[in-house]
Amino acid sequence: MYGCRCWPQKEEMVKNVLFVCSQNKLRSPTAEQVFASWPNIETSSAGTNNDADNPLSAEQIEWADIVFVMEKAHRSKVQGKYRAALKGKRLICLHIPDDYDFMDPGLIRLLEAKVPRHL
């Protein structure tokens, strides 16, 4: 069956991308929305705090191919609590402070400048 494209080629494979901040109210939901329309990308978001809108879980880490956190403190929390689920995953800190509203144009520009090189 030469020429059969039964399996997706590498560039067609979907990447599951998880964005994490503290409360899952401003930065990570913005990132989720900004990259949701990108081809071959599935996005989700969560927060490291127990009272986050969508608290981070091991299942979300396991689902993700790449995990983006907004600050070093988030990276430390994720590494500490989900070390086993992170095995083989890329964990990237974007160094974006909690200075933005949901869908803030400045936040969107920062995300569009920092995230694509890792996808």
Image (cartoon, rainbow, N blue to C red):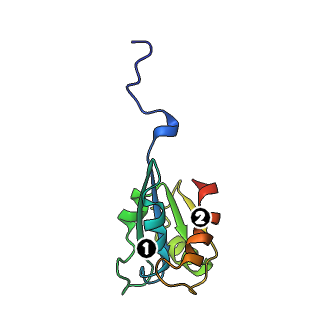
| Residue drawn at (52%, 38%) of the image | 11
Q: Nearer the viewer, mark 2 or mark 1?
A: 2
Amino acid identity at mark 2: Glu
Helix, strand, or loop for circle 1? Answer: helix
Image vertical order of residue 41 relative to residue 7, above or below: below
From the image, tell me which residue sits under label 2.
112
Instruction: Name the residue rendered at 61%, 83% in the picture.
Output: 97
Asked if the residue at tag 1 contacts the one at tag 2, i.e. Cβ–Cβ closer than 8 Å, the answer is no
Q: Is residue 82 left or right of residue 54?
A: right
Other-residue count near label 2 (Cα within 10 Å), few / some / many at <14 / 14–19 / ≥20: some
The disc label shown at residue 42, or none: none
Three-letter amino acid code at the position of disc 1: Pro
Question: Up-down: is 46 above or below 17?
Answer: below
Q: Residues within 10 Å of mark 1 (few under 14, many from 20)?
A: many
Q: CA distance from mark 2 to mark 1?
A: 14 Å
Figure disc tally? 2
Residue 9 percent location from the top left of the image: 48, 32
Residue 65 appears in the figure: yes
Residue 22 lies, in percent from the top left, at: 47, 82
Between 33 and 52, the residue placed more toward the observer is 33
Q: Residue at x 40, y 73 (%)?
A: 56
Residue 95 at what x, y percent from top left?
64, 75
Quadrant of residue 108 within the rendered picture: bottom right
Give the residue pinned by disc 1: 29
Judge whether residue 70 can be spotted in this image: no
Residue 87, above or below 52: above
In the visual, does 97 lie left or right of 37?
right
Question: Residue reaching furthest top?
Answer: 1
